[in-house]
Image (cartoon, coloured by chain):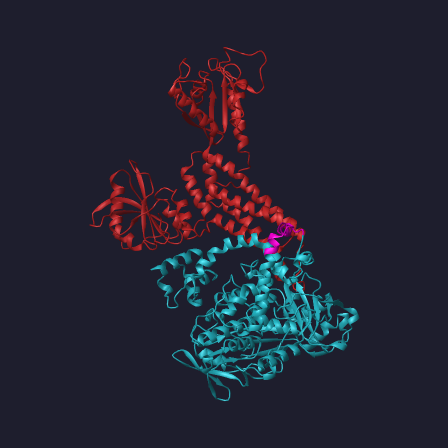
Chain colours: A red, B cyan
């Protein structure tokens, strides 16, 4: 648990532990001049924002390593406090020896996310940016990384700031209406207020609608291969992931466990899931496998329904059980059985003859593209469940306001709701009064960030 | 009463603030002496002939609910009554009365004279005596001194008052009245910081020199809801005419051409002026896109030959005032009774006060009204009431009486005064009240009268009326919630209102005002709940006190800006600290950690 007001000097290894050429140790605290001379034995004060080669000594004065030290003077640093970054040799020993020395000088090991928390508390970043720092570190795809980076640089913050500004403007207009009489100011018409409100509603709704996109970009898409035993699911799975990850035999019911593999398609992480074939069975292990299949299908975004003869016919029995799925029907082993009339809804594949696979990928790519059909260079994307929840609350408030203005035009109530909306948007930036909520957000970070 | 043995409390000044203070002190069983330079000026309305208005009407309702004078006598001396903002939501409906100035002052004087605990003394307070930083005596201009339990300064604009009209400058308290000197110096000597503010007043015109055929008539309401719970129902006030004229481009040109003759624009007045009650030169220069402004012609008393020109406050030379006004048809042959003028005066920046309006520096020394940097009769009266109550409680060594921001506009007013650095004379706004939809004029007495009764402010007669009213409100609410006809639903869907309900047989025993309040409670209930939920955190900080001995230098992790502001204002609670500009939530959190240890 981070103590937001500790105010002591913290340190941590900012690179992963283990064998590496270099490692970076980060230090942050209210004032680090003394510490700098303690560990380097240098009498001259450190020059801010310059990388300097220097030897680092332990508390007994023994040399540990020759390092590159960079000193960032407050407030021009990541945390807003004095920061030192030490690049030393990597491996098991050197970084640990330097950390041990730092602890002996009274420094404390930083909690996960504590550097970012300090940056947030010192107003260097807002909460939206902090969340994106965490997002960038865990990003697996280029697309995700680029969105997170844009948000770190304030893209999302600016978009929400603009919305906040228009809420503030509207509130100012309303307060003028309420607090001044005709002799003092020119009044604004109710139509004008309505127009501004509807514009605001549109902007907030649009912003909220990017949450599913953000979710897709971060968590990816799950595609489940579904069909009767021995319908060729595992063969197709191996073909897609490019290895023999699933065991393939001619014996029906070979696959009993769930097998996953990740691929990146159009910048989106996609998880393919091979499942146990679906049929009635008394055999214990196989029936457990089938139970899991059901669960996987429920959680999937896209279903590949495979069948040797007629996948559409096969799926009919499940269509009421699994709802809201995007389905791609695949007739496997089309070299063995090809119907007289081909269905437009079905892709015919023969792995043996290497045909139909391109078509499957083209179709898949189209579906995925349509899911991320957003002008990413122009519109900001919200990237956490917290952001979506708070914006959802904002949407609810604004819907009540629209109703309120339609029904009666009591501007006193309207203003009260606008203030609530403003608080809501402030919350997005991190104006949160509850320490626990903040802590839980920053605890998702890794140590050293 | 045993409190009668205590030395009296002295109130320096007999304006709206001073009289409410004195009246409250007397109600609480203590002797009080009002010392004024002119006993005839008790309760004088020195500027506009109106009481109430936007947000100020709320204050008057609250003063009345706390047993004060202003509401009842404004009703009694009313010439015309209006409820402003009627199209904008009931929380901002604002009662406003045109008041007969002479009658108002006379009625109040008579009322105070009847009270054995109150005496009025002609004189001028020029200083005070302290022992161990506690007030013991008030000193008068004739060098005599009076022993007192507490001293309340309500000197209005009189401290080193300086009047400007064009080039002419002279020392005065109000036009034709002497300023007060000496007290400012005494306050400075005791370490108080004083600063300058200015305000203006428009010209008074001779009624029979105005061509009323070229004006627009403006009437009030026939059966409005009055300010005071004590005023007899049905309230059928006089409805004297007011008139409206509009300024024109010729007038604007004259003012624009001569604005350098206005002392404020020529830099002669360095004091800060009100942005929200601006002079005509301000309005024309600042809103130069507006081709015309409304001016209101208001009678100052019954059959008054003197007309107050509301909206034309100015410090331009009289001949420019005249030249500008004659461009308006109705004023072609206008005669002045006296010109508009600006006055600048010393004020005591109110960060030096506690929420009781006692100075932080000297025990038993209170200050209230315009001297604290506010504008308006209503703001002054509200402060006088609170200062009076607390001076009495202080003298009796009882707990202070403080209204919070969620109790009343008066709470907002005083909290703003003690936490904010003023940039202009403070005026009450409804938007300053976070709990605006709960703090309505209609429910002022149900919000406050009980609290006032607990400390002895409510006399028997008022308490009877109040009991009756609140019992009737309880049954009315019950009936609205439980009637066979789904009235509650109809109210929420705007399908009925208090007027329709008052015509129903079941409701014939309730007054329209009572039904109005109960209906509004039902209508606003859901929104009030939201507001309370959102503002809960304010309350949790309010209850955490900050000792006045705190050394901000050693508080860890707060910004230098916050340290400076906190040091200057010395807030009494974390809640107050959180409202100081430049103090962030992170600073508050750090401060609260510091206080925990």
Locate residue A146, reporting x and y percent: 47, 38
For image coordinates 48% across by 88% down, the residue present is B144
Residue B116 appears in the rendering: yes
Counting the numbered discs, the total is 0
Front residue of B584 and A400: A400
Residue B217, compared with residue B3, is above or below; it is: above
The main secondary structure of the magenta stretch is helix
Indicate the quadrant where residue B477 lies: bottom right
Residue B421 appears in the rendering: no
Is A284 included in the stretch rendered in magenta? no
Locate residue B544, reporting x and y percent: 41, 61
Taking B327 as reference, is A431 left or right?
A: left
Front residue of A420 and A206: A420
Locate residue A339, reporting x and y percent: 56, 12
Is B483 included in the stretch rendered in magenta? yes
Taking A146 as reference, is A14 left or right?
A: left
Front residue of B265 and A206: A206
Q: Which residues are magenta?
A: B478-495
């Amino acid at each position: 648990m981070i103590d937001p007001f500790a105010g002591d000097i913290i340190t941590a290894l900012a690179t992963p532990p283990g064998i590496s050429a270099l490692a970076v140790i980060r230090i942050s605290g209210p004032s680090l001049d003394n510490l700098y001379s303690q560990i380097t034995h240098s009498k001259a004060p450190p020059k801010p924002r310059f990388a300097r080669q220097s030897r680092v000594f332990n508390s007994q004065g023994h040399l540990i390593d020759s390092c590159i030290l960079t000193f960032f003077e407050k407030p021009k640093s990541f945390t807003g406090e004095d920061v030192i970054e030490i690049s030393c040799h990597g491996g098991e020993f050197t970084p640990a020896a330097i950390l041990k020395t730092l602890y002996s000088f009274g420094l404390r090991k930083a909690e996960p996310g504590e550097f970012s928390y300090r940056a947030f508390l010192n107003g260097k970043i807002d909460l939206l940016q902090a969340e994106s720092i965490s997002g960038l570190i865990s990003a697996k795809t280029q697309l995700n990384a680029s969105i997170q980076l844009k948000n770190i640089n304030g893209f999302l913050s600016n978009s929400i700031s603009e919305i906040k500004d228009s809420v503030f403007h509207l509130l100012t207009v309303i307060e003028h209406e309420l607090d001044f009489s005709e002799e003092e100011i020119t009044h604004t018409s109710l139509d004008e207020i309505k127009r501004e409100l509807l514009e605001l509603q549109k902007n907030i709704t649009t912003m909220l609608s990017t949450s599913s996109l953000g979710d897709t970009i971060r968590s990816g898409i799950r595609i489940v291969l579904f069909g009767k035993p021995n319908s060729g699911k595992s063969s197709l799975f191996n073909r897609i992931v490019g290895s023999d990850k699933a065991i393939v035999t001619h014996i029906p019911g070979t696959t009993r466990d769930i097998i996953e593999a990740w691929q990146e398609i159009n910048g989106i992480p996609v998880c393919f899931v091979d499942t146990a074939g679906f049929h009635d069975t008394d055999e214990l292990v196989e029936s457990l496998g089938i139970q899991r299949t059901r669960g996987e299908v429920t959680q999937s975004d896209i279903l590949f329904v495979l069948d040797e003869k007629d996948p559409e016919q096969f799926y009919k029995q499940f269509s009421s059980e699994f709802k809201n799925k995007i389905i791609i029907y695949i007739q496997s082993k089309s070299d063995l059985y090809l119907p007289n009339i081909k269905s437009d809804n079905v892709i015919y594949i023969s792995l043996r003859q290497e045909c139909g696979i391109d078509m499957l990928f083209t179709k898949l790519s189209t579906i995925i593209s349509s899911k991320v059909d957003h002008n990413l260079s122009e519109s900001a994307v919200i990237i956490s469940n917290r952001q979506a929840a708070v914006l959802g609350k904002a949407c609810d408030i604004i819907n009540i306001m629209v109703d309120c203005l339609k029904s009666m035009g009591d501007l006193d109530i309207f203003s009260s709701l606008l203030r609530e909306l403003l608080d809501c948007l402030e919350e997005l930036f991190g104006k949160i009064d509850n320490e626990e909520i903040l802590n839980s957000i920053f605890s998702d970070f890794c140590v050293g960030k | 009463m045993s409190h009668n043995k205590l030395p009296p409390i002295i109130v320096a000044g007999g304006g709206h603030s001073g009289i409410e203070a004195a009246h409250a002190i007397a109600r609480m069983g203590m002797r009080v002496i009002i010392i004024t330079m002119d006993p005839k000026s008790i309760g004088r309305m020195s500027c506009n002939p109106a009481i109430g208005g936007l947000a100020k009407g709320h204050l008057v309702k609250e003063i009345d609910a706390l047993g004060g004078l202003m509401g009842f006598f404004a009703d009694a001396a009313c010439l015309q009554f209006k409820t402003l903002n009627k199209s904008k939501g009931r929380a901002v409906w604002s009662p406003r009365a045109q008041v007969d100035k002479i009658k108002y002052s006379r009625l109040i004087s008579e009322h105070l004279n009847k009270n054995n605990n109150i005496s009025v003394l002609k004189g001028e307070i020029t200083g005070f005596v302290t022992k161990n930083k506690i007030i013991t005596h008030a000193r008068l201009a004739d060098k005599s001194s009076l022993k007192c339990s507490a001293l309340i300064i309500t000197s209005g604009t009189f401290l080193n008052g300086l009047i400007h009209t064009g080039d002419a400058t002279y020392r005065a308290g109000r036009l034709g009245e002497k300023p007060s000197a000496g007290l400012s110096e005494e306050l400075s000597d005791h370490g108080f910081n004083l600063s300058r503010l200015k305000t203006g007043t428009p010209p008074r015109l001779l009624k029979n020199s105005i061509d009323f055929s070229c004006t627009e008539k403006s009437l009030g309401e026939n059966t409005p809801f009055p300010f005071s719970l004590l005023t007899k129902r049905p309230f059928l006030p006089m409805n004297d005419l007011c008139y409206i004229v509009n300024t024109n481009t010729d007038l604007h040109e004259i003012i624009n051409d001569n604005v350098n003759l206005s002392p404020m624009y020529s830099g002669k007045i360095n004091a800060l002026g009100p942005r929200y009650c601006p002079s005509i030169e301000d309005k024309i220069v600042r809103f130069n896109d507006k081709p015309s402004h409304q001016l209101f012609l208001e009678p100052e008393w019954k059959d008054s030959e003197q007309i107050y020109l509301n909206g034309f406050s100015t410090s331009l030379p009289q001949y420019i005032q005249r030249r500008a006004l004659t461009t308006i048809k109705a004023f072609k042959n206008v005669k002045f009774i006296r010109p508009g003028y600006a006055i600048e005066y010393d004020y005591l920046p109110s960060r030096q006060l506690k929420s009781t309006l006692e100075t932080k520096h000297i025990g038993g020394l209170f200050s209230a009204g315009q001297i604290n940097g506010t504008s308006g009769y209503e703001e002054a009266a509200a402060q006088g009431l609170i200062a009076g109550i607390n001076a009495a409680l202080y003298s009796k060594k009882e707990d202070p009486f403080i209204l919070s921001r969620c109790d009343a506009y008066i709470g907002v007013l005083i909290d703003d005064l003690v936490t904010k650095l003023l940039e202009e004379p403070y005026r009450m706004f409804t938007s300053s009240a976070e709990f605006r939809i709960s703090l309505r004029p209609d429910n002022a007495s149900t919000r406050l009268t009980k609290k006032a009764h607990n400390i002895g402010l409510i006399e028997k007669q008022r308490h009877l009326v109040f009991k009756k009213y609140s019992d009737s409100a309880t049954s009315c609410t019950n009936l609205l919630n439980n009637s066979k006809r789904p009235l509650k639903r109809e109210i929420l869907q705007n399908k009925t209102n208090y007027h329709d309900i008052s015509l129903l047989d079941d409701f014939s025993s309730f007054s329209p005002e009572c039904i109005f309040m109960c209906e509004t409670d039902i209508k606003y209930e859901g929104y009030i709940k939201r507001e309370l939920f959102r503002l809960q955190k304010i309350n949790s900080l309010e209850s955490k006190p900050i000792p006045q001995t705190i050394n901000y230098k050693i508080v860890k992790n707060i910004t230098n800006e916050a340290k400076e502001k906190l040091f200057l204002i010395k807030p009494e609670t974390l809640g107050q600290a959180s409202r100081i500009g430049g103090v962030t939530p992170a600073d508050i959190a750090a401060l609260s950690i510091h206080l925990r240890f």
